[in-house]
Image (cartoon, grey):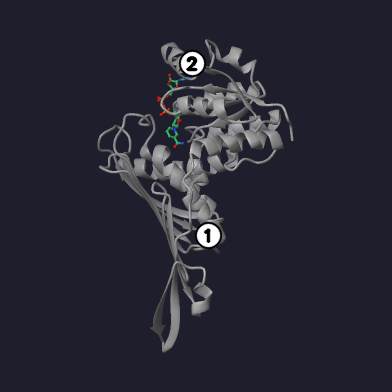
Amino acid sequence: MRNEPVKVGVIGVGHLGQHHAKHYKKLSGTNIVGIFDTDIKRSKKISERYNIPFYDSLIKLLKEVDAVSIVTPTKFHSVVAKICIENGKHIFIEKPITKTLKEADELLELAKQKKVLIQVGHIERLNPALLALKTYNIAPTFIELQRLAPYTSRGTDVPVVLDKMIHDIDILLSLVNNPVRTIQAKGLSILTDSVDIAHARIRFEDGTVASIMSSRIAKDEVRKIKLFQPQLYATIDLLACLTEVYKVIGNKEGGEMSDLVVPFEYNKKMQYIAYEKPAIEKVDLLKLELKNFILSIKNKEKPIVSGKDGRDALKVALEIQNQITQDIN
Ligand code: NAD
């Protein structure tokens, strides 16, 4: 493990990038050298707010750092990331990794050549409500994922599938360790020129089926997952940070550690449903994600969400998006 602090920079300090800068400033083992944004007024504002130097050129910033966060709008991810990797910098790139699969593949290949690390900002992977499932034997047969958000103009440079649904696609691929067999998708535009509401049914090679629904024009924010498998049902509320698990157990003693055990009779045999609500501590996911990035660099380890993970989620997202577009046209 390297001992000296990792020197970092943040590229793009808009709505989200400012928080990257804020967290790096306080993160141990990290030295935030500076920020760069093509909007110089924005750069100055964030520089003053967090007392971090701003740079008027990306190349000047890259000369001073080991690693960067790329938090520009998605359409610029590929071009900015390429420059950073070519200059030998580790990159944390916000989701989606890029707009096209070709761009993602180029970045992955370049990173391999330059021996640098790519982490992708699929932040929900660190959500403790999701991590709470790790203590259970999770092998879902059917999964339902729902993500709704009120409209904001941010993120509308890409369809809802690439902006919102891709979070759930990444979660899904991390839960079902199996290749996708078929996808059926439907979507529509309501407020923007691209797709605002989308639904996809994904079937995996092992028969697991997922239903994903995303909207960016909802009244309220919702981020929920329901997961079904023989003898187990789990609900996860990613926003409320709440996980609830119901499992069938053969005898009452098996539920000693559970919050509630309810008996039921089936085929003249008594069984029990154990209800468990794992204790979950709310955490700042972005802070945790950036800490993981820094530790992955220091320990030369694979980050929690690798460039390949980001690329795999993008591949599924683009297939969904292509189907929707073909259906609309
Ligand atoms: P934003 O528009 O608020 O900020 C983007 C900033 O990048 C702006 O200040 C802009 O001036 C700057 N910029 C544009 N082109 C640039 C370039 N070539 N070099 C340097 N700076 C440049 O956008 P945002 O909402 O902060 O989103 C940024 C990225 O973060 C997007 O990829 C988005 O998908 C992602 N995001 C992820 C999450 C998440 O949950 N992980 C949440 C929100 C946004």
Q: Where is residue 38 in the image (x, y as percent from the top left)?
A: 46, 15
Tell me if residue 92 comes above or below residue 249 in the rendering. above
- Choose the circle earlier in sequence order: 1 or 2: 2
* Residue for point 53% across, 18% down: 35
Q: Is mark 1 on a helix, strand or loop?
A: loop
Tell me if residue 17 comes above or below residue 256 in the rendering. above
Residue 14 image-quadrant placement: top left
Q: Is mark 2 on a helix, strand or loop?
A: helix
* Residue for point 42% across, 48% down: 238
Tell me if residue 297 comes above or below residue 66 in the rendering. below
Indicate which quadrant contains ligand 1: top left
Horizontal side of residue 116 vs 173, given as left or right = right
Whether the residue under disc 2 has CB within 8 Å of ligand 1:
no
Residue 205: assigned label: 1
Note whether residue 4 is visible.
yes
| Amino acid, disc 1 | Glu
Q: Position of residue 10 (x, y in %)?
A: 53, 23
Disc tally is: 2
Tell me if residue 265 comes above or below residue 146 in the rendering. below
* Residue for point 37% across, 36% down: 159
* Residue for point 50% across, 80% down: 251
The residues tagged by marks 1 and 2 sit, at their Cα atoms, a distance apart of 50 Å
Q: In which quarter of the image is the N terminus?
A: top right
Note whether residue 227 is visible.
no
- Residue at mark 2: 47
Q: Position of residue 8 (x, y in %)?
A: 60, 24
Residue sitting nearer the eye, 183 or 34: 34
Horizontal side of residue 3 vs 161, given as left or right = right
> How many other residues sit within 10 Å of disc 2, few (<14), some (14-19) or many (≥20)?
many
Q: Quadrant of the C terminus?
A: top left
